[in-house]
């Protein structure tokens, strides 16, 4: 049956909710700096969860959620040296889900075991490479990635290319070191949202989307106005001990106050070449979390 926009099956008397896509960060930091990244990975934060943390978070929801796709991303997931362990654990914990790994590709060479793991999970797992710029400057540095991709594809690895920069949209603007959010109308922002199917699994909780899940994951010299901090503080993610009604309501929730963080209408813009300048700030993973 359908409840609150999510499909419910029964598993030994308990409800199991099917959802289209569930996402987890394998790492928060990123080796690129894509302007207005919805996950704030462009702002210079470094760090990410351990494989054990990811496993614990997934286990909390394994008996209650059945995502059609379980996405492992970031940030840049290949910055986590234990990425293969996270992938293998996701495939075990969510045995009915397709496993999607999203990467910019530049650090794939640091994970030579990934190709054999994806071969082992053939038919269930694929690697999605996001290409973040079409310029010659970017493509010249991206060519070694493409050479490696072709080698892996020749061995039967499922790798899919996505030109991310052609559909890039602005989530917020930077005014010096201050993040200026657009104060969108929640109904309009939800209607135009690209992230409707991007629930986040973070700190063992479920979050509506990346902009609220990772709010505060930026260096200490980055600031927001109190109105946005207060809005973020007012949001409560869903805890794993929630009732079935609470879980169904969460999965089916549409617009809410936190949607003000996003624009009423999406603004496409030409993404600048996203290579990161050296010397970006480094902080402990939890230093800027509000809870």
Image: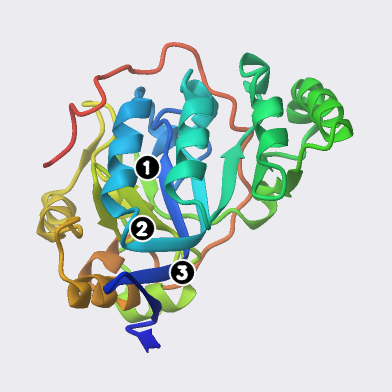
Q: Quadrant of residue 223?
A: top left
Q: How crowded is mark 3: few (under 14 residues within 10 Å), some or many (20 or more)?
A: some
Whether tag 1 and tag 2 are in contact, CB under 8 A, the answer is: no
Query: Which of the two residues, 238 or 7, is positioned nearer the viewer here?
Result: 7
**Which label sits in the foreground, 1 or 2?**
2
Q: Distance between the residues labelled 3 and 1?
A: 20 Å
From this view, report whether residue 169 is shown above or below residue 188.
above
Q: Is residue 5 left or right of residue 20?
A: left
Secondary element type, mark 2: loop
Checking the image for residue 193, the label placed there is: 3
Label 1 belongs to which residue?
A: 174
Secondary element type, mark 1: strand
Q: Which of marks 3 and 1 is nearer the N terminus?
A: 1
Percent position (x, y) of residue 91?
51, 43
From this view, report whether residue 13 is shown above or below residue 148.
below
Q: Residue at x 34, y 81 (%)?
A: 187
Q: Which residue is drawn at 64% across and 30% down?
A: 117
From this view, report whether residue 217 is shown above or below residue 186.
above
Checking the image for residue 209, the label placed there is: 2
**Which label sits in the foreground, 3 or 1?**
3
Q: How crowded is mark 1: few (under 14 residues within 10 Å), some or many (20 or more)?
A: some
Whether tag 3 and tag 2 are in contact, CB under 8 A, the answer is: yes
**Which label sits in the foreground, 3 or 2?**
2
Q: Which of marks 1 and 2 is nearer the N terminus?
A: 1
């Amino acid at each position: 049956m359908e409840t609150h926009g999510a499909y419910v099956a029964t598993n030994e008397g308990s409800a199991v909710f099917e959802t289209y896509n569930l996402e987890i960060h394998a790492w928060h930091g990123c080796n690129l700096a894509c302007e207005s990244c919805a996950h704030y990975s462009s702002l210079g934060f470094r760090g990410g969860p351990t494989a054990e943390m990811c496993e614990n978070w997934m286990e909390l929801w394994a008996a209650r959620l059945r995502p059609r796709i379980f996405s492992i991303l970031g940030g840049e997931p290949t910055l986590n040296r234990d990425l293969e362990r996270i992938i293998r654990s996701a495939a075990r914990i969510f045995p009915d889900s397709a496993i999607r790994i999203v990467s910019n590709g530049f650090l794939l060479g640091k994970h030579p075991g990934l190709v054999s793991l994806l071969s082992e999970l053939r038919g269930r797992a694929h690697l999605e490479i996001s290409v973040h710029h079409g310029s010659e400057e970017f493509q010249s540095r991206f060519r070694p990635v493409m050479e490696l991709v072709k080698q892996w594809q020749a061995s039967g690895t499922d790798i899919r290319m996505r030109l991310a920069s052609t559909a890039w949209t602005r989530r917020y603007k930077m005014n010096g070191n201050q993040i200026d959010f657009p104060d969108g109308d929640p109904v309009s922002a939800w209607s135009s949202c690209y992230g409707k199917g991007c629930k986040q699994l973070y700190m063992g909780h479920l979050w509506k989307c990346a902009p609220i899940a990772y709010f505060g994951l930026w260096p200490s010299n980055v600031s927001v106005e109190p109105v946005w901090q207060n809005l973020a503080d007012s949001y409560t993610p869903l805890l794993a001990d929630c009732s079935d009604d609470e879980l169904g309501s969460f999965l089916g929730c549409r617009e809410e106050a936190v949607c003000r963080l996003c624009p009423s209408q999406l603004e496409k813009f030409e993404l600048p070449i996203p290579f990161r300048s050296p010397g970006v700030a480094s902080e402990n993973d939890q230093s800027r979390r509000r809870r």
